[in-house]
Amino acid sequence: MKAVVITKPGPPSVLAWEDRPAPARGRGQLLIEVRAAGLNRADIMQRLGHYPPPPGTTEDIPGLEAAGMVLEADPESPFRPGDRVMALLPGAAYATVAVAAEDLAIPVPQDWSWEEAAAVPEVYLTAFDALVSRLAILPGEWLLIHSVGSGVGIAALQLAQVLGARTIGTSRQSWKLERAHALALDHGVLLKDDGSWKEEVRRLVPEGVDAVLDLVGAGHWPASLEILRSRGRIVIVGLVSGSRTELDLGLLLQRRIRVEGTALRSRPDWEKAALVQEFRQTAWRSMLARQVRPVIDRVFPAEEASAAHRYLEENRSFGKVVLRFPPD
């Protein structure tokens, strides 16, 4: 098979298109001919040497989500060779052949492209977990989404609409806020390092927002706490701006704020499988009805993975960046 390989920790140029032995599947797993794979910030962190994959996962092939055709499955599996699937992977999705747990795979509708399917598993499951399982968003609540133009940010915006929430999105780039408004974002706020953005949020919602989805990390942590109302909730998913900050415990106690962190990759498969099952029973129906659609910014040939990583790192994308793979 062909794969995008991390030859050593470093910039996008360390990615190479190489021949590798195809993986072997185990019981309860699918062998998939990958036709497209979504890019995520975690892939960049792995390339830099800061985010190793779980034990037992190929260390030098990144990728957490893919779509393709089933090559092999157990006789009792609900999937058969030739089925179109999208899947959540612990790693090694950047290859023409990959292995995924069958419980972490979802059938791909016939009218979906491979690229659309590959843009779903990681970001929509992450957003669903954050909004439904962690924040328990209710109709009419105010949700602040940091980095609303990112893959997870857009997925969260779309799912928030299905849940009936009112939304405020932040971004450092005004054009991304304009694009988010086209997806029915209620209010966009331009992020500034001086923290003045929180005053704009306060103007919009004087009593404070009900919940914050933080896809950024330490950079806006103090201000995010300040704009939460009493008994507000905040869930942290990303650490792009750092992982260390100061915490005002008095504010947490006074307002009874609930703080939670979450990540998919480090979870055991049984926990991920439960999330996939819940997603398929609820939010997936909106996607099948095309009420929620993945937003794809750009598709790169897999051989140009270095350029794709560079593009994502430059924050030029709105939505997902996807790699397209040739038939193996």
Image (cartoon, grey):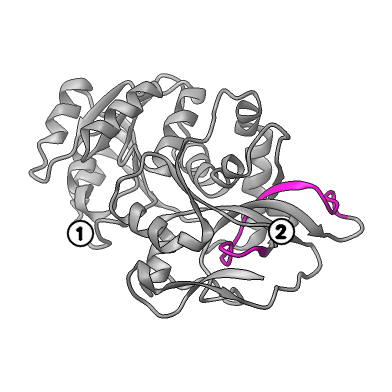
Q: Nearer the viewer, residue 223 or 194?
A: 194
Q: Indicate the amino acid at tag 1.
A: Thr
Residue type, numbered disc 2:
Glu
Magenta-span inclusion, residue 179 = no
Neighbour tally class for label 1: few under 14, some 14-19, many 20 plus, Cα within 10 Å: few
Examine the rendered structure and indicate whether residue 97 appears above or below residue 158: below
- Report how many numbered discs are placed on residues in the image: 2
Residue 25 % position (x, y)? 76, 69
Q: Residue furthest right?
A: 75
Q: Is residue 226 left or right of residue 7?
A: left
| Highlighted range, magenta | 77-97
Q: Is residue 207 above or below residue 308?
A: above
Residue 35 percent location from the top left of the image: 64, 53
**Near-viewer residue (130 or 120):** 120
Residue 33 - label: 2
Q: In the image, which disc is placed on residue 245?
A: 1
Residue depicted at 85% across the width and 51% down the height: 80
